[in-house]
Image (cartoon, rainbow, N blue to C red):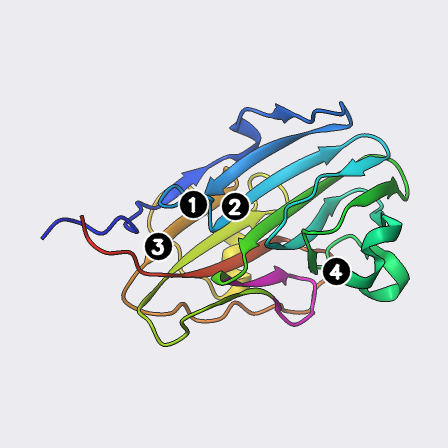
Amino acid sequence: MAPSRNAMRALHASWMAVTPEPWKNGGGVTRTLSVDAAQQPPRWRVSVADIDRDGPYSRFPGYDRVSVVLSGGGVELVVEEADVADVADAGRITLAPGVATAFVGDAGFQSRLMNGRVRVLNLFVLRGAAVASVVCVGGGLAAVEAGGLAQGDATTHTLRIVVAAQAGRLNQAAADAGVALEAGDYAAGVSCGIDARRAFTPAQPTARDGVAAVVLDVRVLALAAV
């Protein structure tokens, strides 16, 4: 039998080694850590963005987003007036350091840096095609959920991505989260892989002063073998 198109070998690499892609408006750069290559449009994508100045946030219609500020003072997102009905809190969202925050990608936002440049981890999940749970290890808060599956009783695959907030800290961060990593060098910064046999044991947020890593579990419907 041919391997499933969902099959994916574990990846262990430094996210700082990923080639940055500049934003069209020149306000920052983005590094794509992992993306769904099995379908178009992608069912999920994980990236790290460096934001240098205030400016517009791109729309992602049909996607739910979860953002975590890894460094810097935070970001305030102000929704465009026509989209206020789609966003809670009177059209304002605060992305605080070390806090996973979920919001819709359909709305247009203007961003305002709260205390200088920031680095933000971003998850995008296609509604109806993927569901995700995001835990900040060391943040002490419960998991944040995003997305959803149209066929909840179908066979699914789970992708786990562990992203260290600082390079060289992934081993300890994973241990704190109760995440089992395969043998190898994880000090560089990011680990991901698919386990089609079982669901992962939920990561534990723990109570610490400062986020050591972010654990993202993304579940998608299994694709037919090819």
The label shown at residue 194 is 3
**Mark 1 → mark 4, Cα distance in angstroms:** 33 Å
User: Closer to us: mark 4 or mark 2?
Assistant: 2
Q: Earlier in the sequence, mark 1 or mark 2?
A: 1
Disc 2 is placed on an element classified as strand
Horizontal side, residue 149 vs residue 169: left or right: left
Q: Earlier in the sequence, mark 1 or mark 3?
A: 1
Disc 3 is placed on an element classified as strand
Q: Are the two marked residues, 1 and 4, in contact with CB atoms closer than 8 angstroms?
A: no
Horizontal side, residue 124 vs residue 89: left or right: left
**Mark 3 → mark 2, Cα distance in angstroms:** 14 Å
Amino acid type indicated by mark 3: Ile
**Mark 4 → mark 3, Cα distance in angstroms:** 30 Å
Q: Which residues are magenta?
A: 131-145
Question: Is residue 108 at all visible to an observer of this figure?
Answer: yes
Amino acid type indicated by mark 1: Asp
User: Closer to us: mark 3 or mark 2?
Assistant: 2
Magenta-colored stretch includes residue 22: no
Which residue position holds label 2? Answer: 45
Q: Residue at x 47, y 51 (%)?
A: 43
Q: Are the two marked residues, 1 and 2, in contact with CB atoms closer than 8 angstroms?
A: yes
Disc 1 is placed on an element classified as loop
Number of residues whose C-alpha sits closer than 10 Å to that of mark 4, classed few (under 14), some (14–19) or many (20 or more): few
Q: Earlier in the sequence, mark 4 or mark 2?
A: 2
Amino acid type indicated by mark 2: Arg
Question: Is residue 187 at all visible to an observer of this figure?
Answer: no
Q: Earlier in the sequence, mark 4 or mark 3?
A: 3
Which residue position holds label 4? Answer: 209
Percent coordinates x, y for residue 224 in the rendering: 23, 56
Percent coordinates x, y for residue 97 in the rendering: 78, 52
